[in-house]
Amino acid sequence: MPKRGLAALAITAIALVPLINFKTPDEPVLDRTSGNLAIVEPSSGAGAGAGATPVPGATAVPGATAVPGATAAATVDGPVVSTRFGPVQVEVVVANGKVTDVVALQLPTGRRSGQISDYAEPILHDEALQAQSASIDLVSGATYTSDAYAESLQAALDQAGLG
């Protein structure tokens, strides 16, 4: 009898391995600028290049636009940076050579990822405004989001001529 129990335990353990390693597909991500859903494309490299594919009927976010009524002000969108939890994209508002605002256009959503994004976003925003650069401290528990936020921010600052 003990041999049967041991065999059953071994078979159960072997069967659990694929279940433990199962990863759910990426969830649709809400584009915070337009409210449209975008489907996340898995990235082949860490944080490189792949972005979100808009759902049919979605509108594209412009790369750089002037802020109405402001002198020497511009709004520049950083690139979409893919993470294992979802895309991250920021928009930087620059006026007279200073960063006046940073807006997260896309952050990971979903169950736990959404909670982490909601927690990390105001901290990253304040860090970016205080530093006036992408050299910001990472938020504990939101390392992937923080790294991608800084990467998108740096690219936007480079495009705005502040990098």
Image (tube, rainbow, N blue to C red):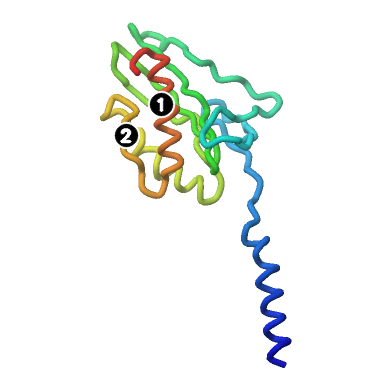
The answer to whether residue 17 is left or right of residue 161 is right
Q: Is residue 131 left or right of residue 112?
A: left
CB atoms at circles 1 and 2 under 8 Å apart?
yes
Q: CA distance from mark 1 to mark 2?
A: 10 Å
What residue is at 52 percent from the left and 28 percent from the top? 80
Name the quadrant of the C terminus: top left
Q: Between residues 163 and 141, which one lies in front from this camera angle?
A: 163
Determine the residue positioned at 71% across, 88% down. Answer: 3
Sequence-wise, which precedes: disc 1 or disc 2?
2
Q: Position of residue 98 (x, y in %)?
A: 29, 17
The kind of residue on which mark 1 rests is: Leu
Question: In the image as oriented, which residue stretches furthest toward the front?
Answer: 3
State the image quarter where residue 158 is shown.
top left
Residue 33: x and y in percent read 52, 26
Q: Which quadrant would the N terminus be assigned to in this image?
A: bottom right
- Please give the label number shown on residue 153: 1
Residues packed near mark 1 inside 10 Å, few (<14), some (14 to 19) or many (20 plus): many
Residue designated by label 2: 136
Using residue 134 as the reference point, say whether residue 61 is left or right of it: right
Depicted 65 relative to depicted 120: above or below: above
